[in-house]
Amino acid sequence: MTLALVLGTPSRVMSHFTILSSVVVAAVFTASAWRAWTARRPLPPSVTAGTMLYAVGAGLVQHVILANGSSALSITGDTGTLTGWPALTNQLLHTAVPVMAVVDWFLLTRPGPLRLHSAATWLVLPAAYLAFTLARGALLPAGTQARYPYPFLDVSRHGYVEVLGNATVLGLACYGLALLLVALDHIRPVPRRHRPPENRISSPATGGLK
């Protein structure tokens, strides 16, 4: 994320959902580490699972939609085949962060179990981002660079009807992914934790010396 801010303009970089999801991942991972270090209760399962959903969703949109053909796009504004630092930034944000979030959820968090209503709750953040993006685009003057951060949300090119249709399709896809996440949470195994070695010399019932 820091690399993206250095390579691109802050207003352009910060307008992407990928950056928002990365901020959420960083905040949640930091809070989880602090709770583990201070022996506090872990974060609610819906928080950690929702964080993974945002990271994976941002990565899928990039790899499935934006990285293909004429729609290829990078957060820093570079076009065409990415090389050097822009390519590294793209891979870190859209591949490394989602993979890290998935590994953390599967190996380091216990099953919730998650509830079906969580899938709808997780859509609040993407919906708020959509409203912010459309309002920001409407307030910025026509011709402003990166007025709309994603081609499928470009109202000046597609109009509100098509843009809202695109957003609805993505929202349904995100909801389906959220339902899959809830289902996986009910069948995934509990992560194994290392236990201290058992004392095989004295019986657990043996008391201390008087």
Image (tube, grey):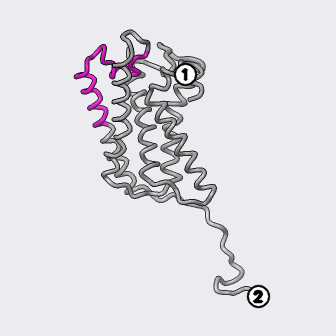
Q: Residue at x 45, y 37 (%)?
A: 55
Q: Which x, y percent locates residue 138? A: 34, 19
Viewport quadrant of the C terminus: bottom right
Which quadrant holds residue 84?
A: top right
Q: Which residue position holds label 1?
A: 87
Q: Which residues are magenta?
A: 146-173
Instruction: Please tell me whether mark 1 sits on a helix, a strand or a loop.
Output: helix
Frontmost residue, 26 versus 128:
128
Whether the magenta-drawn stretch holds residue 132 is answered as no
Whether the magenta-drawn stretch holds residue 148 is answered as yes
Identify which amino acid the numbered label 1 is placed on. Ala
Neighbour tally class for label 2: few under 14, some 14-19, many 20 plus, Cα within 10 Å: few
Magenta-drawn stretch, dominant element (helix, strand or loop): helix
Q: Which x, y percent locates residue 19? A: 49, 30
Q: Which x, y percent locates residue 149? A: 41, 21
Frontmost residue, 28 versus 186:
28
Instruction: Please tell me whether mark 2 sits on a helix, a strand or a loop.
Output: loop
Q: Which residue position holds label 2?
A: 209
Q: Which x, y percent locates residue 195? A: 62, 66
Rendered view: 133 above or below 144: below
Identify which amino acid the numbered label 2 is placed on. Leu
- CA gap between label 1 and label 2 equals 66 Å
Rendered view: 74 above or below 106: above
Q: Residue at x 58, y 19 (%)?
A: 7
Viewport quadrant of the N terminus: top right
